[in-house]
Amino acid sequence: MSQIHDLVRELREPNNSKIVLLVADGLGGLPLLPGGKTELETAKTPHLDDLAKIGVSGLSVPVLPGITPGSGPGHLGLFGYDPLEFRIGRGILEALGINFQVGPRDVAIRGNFCTLDASGTISDRRAGRPSTETCVEVCKILAKIEVPGAEIFVEPVREHRFVLVIRGDNLGDRVNDTDPQIVGAKPLLASGADDASKRTAEIINQFVEKATRALIDQAPTNGITLRGFARHPAIASMHDVYGLRSAALAVYPMYRGLARLVGMEILETGPTLETQVDALKAAWNDHDFFFLHYKYTDATGEDGNFDAKVKATEAFDAIIPAVRALNPTVLIVTGDHSTPSKMKSHSWHPVPTLLSADTCRTDAVTTFGESACLQGGLGQFEAKHLMLLAMAHAGRLGKYGA
């Protein structure tokens, strides 16, 4: 049980304040050359800069210094759940994201379609990012596979992603990822860390072998990798901890799953930032806390496309006036982790963070970027404390002690 959560339950006070958390996935970056500008610093972000002038800025550390987080730990920290205490496998998040009901006999796994060459080596970890329609059709092939001793469920998610759920008795989730995370290597065999997980690994290896045979003529989606083996965890809801009526506006299933995991209501929205903001406006009177997720700052970073990440950042900046027009009590802009296009991957670098509220002790920061945030009043802090700041600025935390 989290001591911080217990303290929040003790101190929380209800009121009519509104908190908005805008998450640009993978927001942080790196300059391409020493002394240059990052993607965020290169982008034209007049609205974020205006917000920085009246707010307080800093850099958040998603897990610990030097630790590169996945999206799950990165977001849990932003929601105020210590990612070292609440270790949630990605498979559960993907399953919840598509509203697959995971039961007590289930192990959920996040799957990727990949491209294998003639030697069985991965040449593209994401199979060229196939259409979601292709994903659906290839999942139908995998869904026909049977493995003795377990029920198998294969559900499409989006593009190259799918969910694999195995259901049976005495299954464990302490199984290694089969994704080597690089091209030029073969998918790894699954192995388990205990007896129940070894049983899971045996089932998985049989499934992967049959899947590879079934997909042999389906290039570029002719292989699969698996990661994030997970059973359903016990985790308190945002309402239980913070007393907040929380809602999520997210397009990608995994982030909907993260929000559902902590008890947020999933609001229906279109695929664009503009439709997400429209849904935010429509639900404004029904909730106290809103989480709005934007994916493309991360996707362009992982593609190694500096210019595209700059443009994605500028698109994110463009919605700030519409959100501010709603007059939230607290408005936070940040990311769940850094994804420098220079590295083509998540990284451990602290994430630019901006908080705006009438109760801010403003700093000297006038632009929103990594170097500027380093000088901000929030300093460098652990992301798990961001919700405490949000609650305090929203007037929702009482005094601690006499």
Image: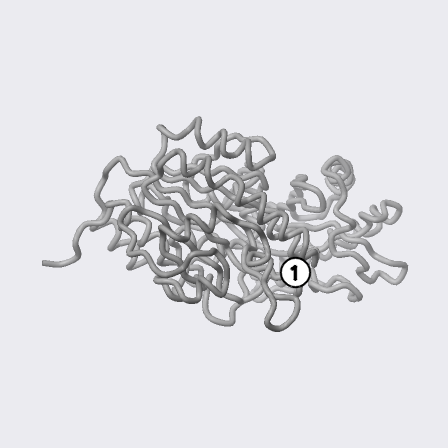
Q: Residue at x 54, y 67 (%)?
A: 348
- Report the residue at 69% width, 60% height from top: 179
Please say if 249 is above or below 36.
Answer: above
Disc 1 crowd, CA 10 A, few/some/many (<14, 14-19, 20+): many
Between 21 and 159, the residue placed more toward the observer is 21
Residue 170 visible in the snapshot: no
In this rendered view, identify the residue nearer to me: 380 or 337: 380
Q: Secondary structure at mark 1?
A: loop
Residue 35 lies, in percent from the top left, at 59, 72
Q: How is the image coloured?
A: one colour
Residue closest to the far left: 402
Q: Is residue 260 left or right of residue 216?
A: left
Q: Is residue 375 left or right of residue 223?
A: left
Q: Quadrant of the C terminus?
A: bottom left
Quick check: can you spot residue 387? Answer: yes
Residue 59 percent coordinates (x, y): 44, 62
Count of numbered badges drawn on the protein: 1
Q: Which residue is mark 1?
A: 341
Image vertical order of residue 181 relative to residue 292, above or below: below
Residue 395's spot in the image, x, y percent? 24, 45
The quarter of the rendered structure image containing the N terminus is bottom left
**Front residue of 354 and 173:** 354
Tell me residue 151's x, y (percent): 65, 43
Q: Amino acid at mark 1?
A: Ser
Question: Residue at image x 50%, y 63%?
Answer: 370
Q: Quadrant of residue 5?
A: bottom left
Point 70% across, 59% down: residue: 304
